[in-house]
Image: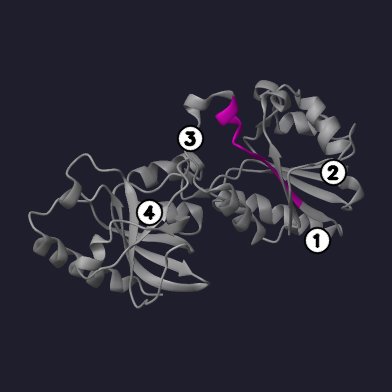
Amino acid sequence: MHVTKSYQGLKDKYRNIVVGLGNFDGVHIGHQRLITEVVSTAKNIGGTAVILTFDPHPLSVLAPNNNPPKLLTQQGKEKMIGRLGVDAIISVPFNLEFAKMTPEEFIEKVLYEQLAAKVVVVGYNYTFGNKGAGNADTLKSKAEKYKYQVKIIPPVKIGDQVISSTLIRRYLMEGDVTEATKYLGHPPFVEGIVVSGDRRGNTIGFPTANLNLDQEQLVPAKGVYSVHVVVDEDTFLGVANIGIKPTFNGAGGKTNLEVHLLDFSGDLYGKNITVKFIRRLRSEQRFSSVHELVSQIKNDIKEAQADRM
């Protein structure tokens, strides 16, 4: 899979481009439905499956105060999309100049002149162009003029609930990673570099890896979670804590993520690891003594054993 920031001249590099448009935050089940449609359509016409998205999110430029926290880092998003079989991802740098482009200018200058798109695939609620004036109907109305077909993906539901990134953010902010997983189609996860912490876990018998997180990415609510941790392509069961460690820091500590890996021995410092949240075990709490904390950690580990792969 090829990742690029420029759409210039891609019609000369790829044949019969089928392009999916969207932000794809979280790459949830609805997004997966759209992306697999892009891939299957490209195969059917002997073409190239391309996803065009933006980095950063347009709202971070146009309305920073209303910009939602990301469900995935840009790198994480690209990895997830790549696993679905696309040939190329265009992560267009979004800025105020690009935002001024009208819907027809986007269709003409990007989809037609630079991509020569044969098929354009969008979600039912997709908007584009200056002030979001363009939508799926706009694309359909210009299809004959600019020589492409349009495929519109209807709402994807579980039961009566339409899947959306907004819904998934709500579940994560409530700490309900089980429900979030149902709509994502994969466990919510974070990636980060293991950094040096206060090493207090070593002193009580439960060494932990502290992650240096992307501050723009949404992590689940404070609490203790059963997790699967990927280290160098191997996966380990673990127990993670998101919070301020109130037993030691009181109420004013900084929120961080630390994870204790079961059945692992070795040095993690400086490694990039992935923490997948499987289930919330309990809320974060303050203990009256280290002995009481250690007893609870043992109980957490015992409960997490049920989530072995």
Earlier sequence position, callout 1 versus callout 2: 1
Q: Nearer the viewer, mark 4 or mark 1?
A: 4
Along the line of sight, the residue nearer the viewer: 292 or 142: 292
Q: Is residue 262 above or below residue 117?
A: below
What residue lies at 71% left-to-right and 54% top-to-bottom? 37
Location of mark 4 (residue): 177
What amino acid type is highlighted by mark number 3? Pro
Q: Is residue 172 above or below residue 268?
A: above
Classify mark 3: helix, strand or loop: loop
Question: Pointer 2: residues within 10 angstroms few (<14), some, or many (20+)?
Answer: many
Q: Nearer the viewer, mark 3 or mark 1?
A: 3
Location of mark 3 (residue): 68
Classify mark 1: helix, strand or loop: helix
**Cα distance between the residues tagged 4 and 1:** 35 Å
* Residue 118 image position (x, y, % from top left): 86, 46
Tell whether position 38 is magenta. no
User: How did the renderer colour the structure?
Assistant: one colour
Location of mark 1 (residue): 43
**82 horizontally vs 288: left or right:** right
* Residue 113 image position (x, y, % from top left): 89, 36
Tell whether position 58 is magenta. yes
Circles 3 and 4 in contact, beta carbons < 8 Å? no
**Cα distance between the residues tagged 1 and 2:** 14 Å
Image: magenta residue range = 50-61
**140 horizontally vs 67: left or right:** right
Earlier sequence position, callout 2 versus callout 3: 3
